[in-house]
Every structure is written in C-alpha cells, then in structure tokens.
C-alpha cells in the first residue's frame, strides 16, 4: 500500500486471529516507529514487547484490579465495572502481541525551574506519541491490526512492576497487535471542522 492508502485505512482493531506474529515483522514495525521525529533528536521512546501468554494474562489481571479499584472509588455500579474490566482484559489477553510504549527522560534536557521542566516532559510525550503513530501505520502497511490503549497512564507502577521495566521507563500506552479478525470503517469529520486559515 502507498502512504495515503495506509493512512486512510488504518483503524483501531481490537479483535485478532490467533496467528502469531514473527519477531522479524515486529522488528520491522518497531524500526519504522523509531524513524519518528523527536525533541532535540533525543529519541525518548522505549518499547516493551510482550509475546508470552502468561505475561499478557498477568498484566491484564493486575491492570484490571487497579481499574476495578479506581472505578469503585468513583462510585460506579459494580456490574458496569465488571463489564469494563472484562472488556479490557479480553482485549489484552487475546492479542498475539502487546507493545508497551514508554518514554524516558534520561536524555532529555533538565531545567532548574518547574515550568520549563514540564514543557520538556511534554516534548518527550509528543515524541513518544509520534513514534506510536508510526508504529500503528507500519502495522497497517504490513497487514496487521493494532489498537492504542491509554490504560497504562492510570496504572504505570503496575505496568512497571509486572514487566520489570527500567526505573526511567514511563508507560504511556499499550498497543495491541495482531492479524485482524474484524474490519472497521470509521468516518472522519470534514476538514473545515478542525482547521482555521489565517
């Protein structure tokens, strides 16, 4: 597929076949991910790839427990909590591969004042997100489906502990990857809804 076809057909795929993904193919899409631009070219993205079913199950279970606790504290109906937690669990364990997108501030600039430090952090977040978008497009270009899940933002310490991540790796997203078992067609708003010309 050419770029425009890839860009316009990429969708958030949540159901996958059981067909495994080769490590070579995963390395190809990760190689495309790291071609993204980054602040100061510091390349703060980090990727944890999970292929092991037992690890996927443990991660899904422990993230689910945190989700249940958070929603219970919000006063959400227990039946709705179980539906939400169950849906998340199924999405995670049924994907042949998971890629946890993280960022590291290790190589970013450090400032004495908090305001500039926060902006530097946001630059790292933006950089990691651009790598994540590259990854999603590369997955589509290679016949894979993928879905970006923001759940690690709500339980970063759970993700760090289960995956034994280095201390400076800050989880930003969990991307499920696999061969699609569904087709999605989601419309986009017309251009004029999002653009101002000056």
Image: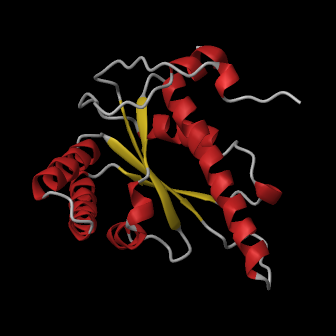
Write down the quadrant of residue 71 in the picture: bottom left
Q: What residue sits 73% from the left and 28% below the top?
A: 195
Question: What residue appears at the point 50 percent right and 25 percent down from the top-left corner?
Answer: 140
Taking the view exactly as shown, the residue that stands out farthest to the right is 198
Any part of residue 2 in sight: no
Q: How many marks?
A: 0
Question: Looking at the picture, how far across and down is residue 43, in whole percent?
Answer: 70, 57
Kindly identify the residue that appears in the image at 74 percent across and 66 percent down: 119
Above or below, 23 against 13 in this view is: below
Q: Nearer the viewer, residue 188 or 157?
A: 188
**As drawn, is 194 to the left or to the right of 14?**
right
x, y (%) of residue 174?
42, 51
Residue 196 in the image: above or below residue 168: above
In the rendered image, residue 67, in percent from the top left (x then y), is placed at: 27, 62
Q: Which residue is drawn at 67% across and 30% down?
A: 194
The answer to whether residue 108 is visible is yes
Give the colour scheme shown: secondary structure
Q: In this view, does 39 lie above or below 119?
A: above
| Position of residue 34 measured from the top left corner of the image (x, y, whole percent) | 65, 46
Q: Quadrant of the N terminus?
A: top right
Residue 196 position by quadrant: top right
Q: Nearer the viewer, residue 153 or 58?
A: 153
Compared to residue 84, the image places residue 12 above or below, namely above
């Amino acid at each position: 597929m050419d770029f425009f076809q890839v860009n316009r057909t990429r969708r958030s795929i949540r159901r996958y076949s059981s067909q495994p993904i080769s490590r070579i193919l995963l390395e190809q899409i990760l190689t495309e991910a790291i071609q993204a631009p980054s602040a100061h070219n510091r390349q703060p993205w980090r990727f944890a790839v999970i292929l092991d079913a037992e690890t996927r199950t443990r991660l899904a279970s422990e993230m689910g427990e945190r989700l249940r606790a958070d929603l219970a504290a919000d006063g959400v109906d227990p039946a709705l909590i179980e539906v939400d937690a169950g849906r998340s669990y199924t999405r995670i364990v049924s994907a042949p591969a998971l890629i946890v997108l993280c960022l590291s501030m290790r190589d970013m600039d450090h400032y004495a004042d908090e305001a500039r430090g926060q902006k530097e952090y946001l630059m790292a977040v933006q950089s990691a997100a651009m790598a994540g978008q590259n990854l999603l497009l590369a997955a589509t270009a290679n016949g894979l489906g993928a879905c970006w899940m923001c759940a690690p933002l709500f339980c970063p310490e759970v993700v760090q502990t289960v995956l034994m991540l280095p201390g400076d790796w800050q989880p930003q997203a969990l991307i499920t990857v696999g061969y699609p078992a569904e087709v999605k067609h989601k419309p986009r708003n017309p251009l004029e809804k999002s653009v101002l010309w000056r």
